[in-house]
Every structure is written in C-alpha cells, then in structure tokens.
Amino acid sequence: MRLKGQIALVTGGSRGIGRGIVKAFAREGAKVAFVYRGNKEAADSLVAEVQGLDGTIMALQADVAKAEDAKTCVEKIEKEWGPVEILVNNAGIIRDDLFVRLEPEAWNSVIETNLGGTFNFTHAVAYGMMKARKGRIINISSVVAEHTNPGQTNYAASKGAINAFTRALAVELASRGVTVNAIAPGFIETDMSAAVRNKAGDLIKKMIPARRLGEPEDIAKAAVFLASSDAGYITGQVLTVDGGLSLGASAM
C-alpha cells in the first residue's frame, strides 16, 4: 500500500474523477476525507462503499469557493485524524456558452469554484505542510487549458490559471519537501462531460488515438502515483492523461 496511514483530502470527491481518486487512495491505505457540495446521496453511498472495503473515510459538506469553509474542513480533519498530508483540488464546474452570450455570473462562478476553490484549500493546508516539511498537492486541470473549444473561455481560463498556479507554487514549496503538480484529463466518462460527449457522439473516440474515452480510474492511478513517494522528485509538472487526444492526430 503506497499511501498507508497518510491523511488525504479530496475536493469534489462524491462523483466522477474525485470519487475515483477517493476510492483509489483508500485502497492504497490512506485515510481519506472528501468534500462535496450538495449531493448527500452520492456522498453517503461513497462512504458506505469505502467502509465496506475496510477503508477510513470522512465526508465533509462545503462550498469550495468559500475560504471559511475550506478552513473549517481542514480544522475538522486535523482534530479527528491529524494534519493533511495529501491534497487533491478536484472540485470544478462548467458553465459553457459563447463569449458574447456569457453572463458575468457564469464567468464568476466558474473562476471562483475552479480557481478560487483550489486557492482556498491549498491556502488552508500549505503552511502545515511547510512546517512538517512534507506534503503532496495535486490540482486537477484539463487539456482544455491548452486545447480549448468554442464556448469555454471561462473554463479554459480557470484551468490555464491552475496550471500557472501549480508551477509558481511548486517553486515556493519545493525546498520544504512539498510537491505541487497537476493532472490534465482529456475526455473522461463522468456526469460533468456528458453533454459534450453526447453532442459529439462517436466522433470523440475517433479524435483520441487510444480510441476510447478515459475512465475516472485512469486519472485516479495518476493521482496515486503523484501522491506516493515514487514521485518525490517531481514537482511543478502538468501530467496529461488523455489517451493522446492533445497530440492533435487526425482521425483515421
């Protein structure tokens, strides 16, 4: 077990990629707390699933866009288990629309959740990690940060900023034994990507050299690696996990 006894926190953990990461961390022996915003049914089912596998798990309801919520979540974990050693900033939303039709609320909500949430939870754990001289921060980005589509100015901006944030923070924390990396998923089979996948149909698979959509488990495996001691000399990197989509190969 690569993460045995470590304390991990995953935002947006009740569904999709976050859910996959929570289960993967638990299987590797970590104590895993996850944050969800409103879907208590999904959160409860994940808790039951992990507990059924003899894992240690904690569900925390919070709005990642609120700094006070992030602080409260971290304080609760510290009180129950101890300091957070692994943070995965996964929580994110999409509000796609062409820029000329994009309402300020759609811009602000995406930036505040995707980028602001990453800041809030990282800020809540960074000092403790620095003091302990160890820690792993993993930010979930997207291939959209570099290879975007029409109607995604807000989402692309938030993910591009997360990549820059990852690199800048890695420089600051490296000497304290804390690594900061990002994972950029491609098309993954989740509820969040359903609208895009349904609209494009089989064309998506033809765009991907691997000829299949990704699964949450594909991202979870990358997260386990970056959280483990195997990745101790890797920091400030954006690991693309997209089946080759971003290579720009033509459909054949």
Image (cartoon, helix red, strand yellow):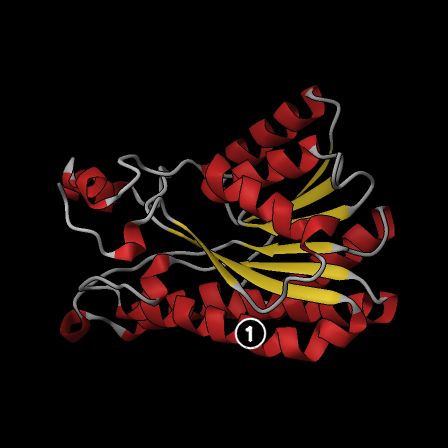
165 or 210: nearer the eye?
210
Task: Check disc 1: other Cα within 10 Å, few if <14, some if 14-19, many if 20+.
Answer: some
Rendered position, 182 above or below 24: below
Q: Position of residue 36 (x, y in %)?
A: 56, 47
Q: Position of residue 127 (x, y in %)?
A: 78, 72
- Quadrant placement of the C terminus: top left
Give left or right: position of 38 versus 60. left
- Quadrant placement of the N terminus: top right
Kind of residue at disc 1: Arg
Give left or right: position of 104 versus 35. left
Q: Quadrant of residue 93?
A: bottom left
Rendered position, 105 above or below 52: below
Give left or right: position of 49 versus 206. right
9 or 29: nearer the eye?
29
Q: Residue at x 27, y 70 (%)?
A: 153
Q: Residue at x 21, y 52 (%)?
A: 249
Total marks in image: 1
Q: Residue at x 52, y 32 (%)?
A: 41
Mark 1 lies on a secondary structure that is helix
Q: Position of residue 26 (x, y in %)?
A: 69, 34
**Mark 1, residue position:** 167
Q: Position of residue 164 (x, y in %)?
A: 49, 75
Q: Residue at x 39, y 58 (%)?
A: 142
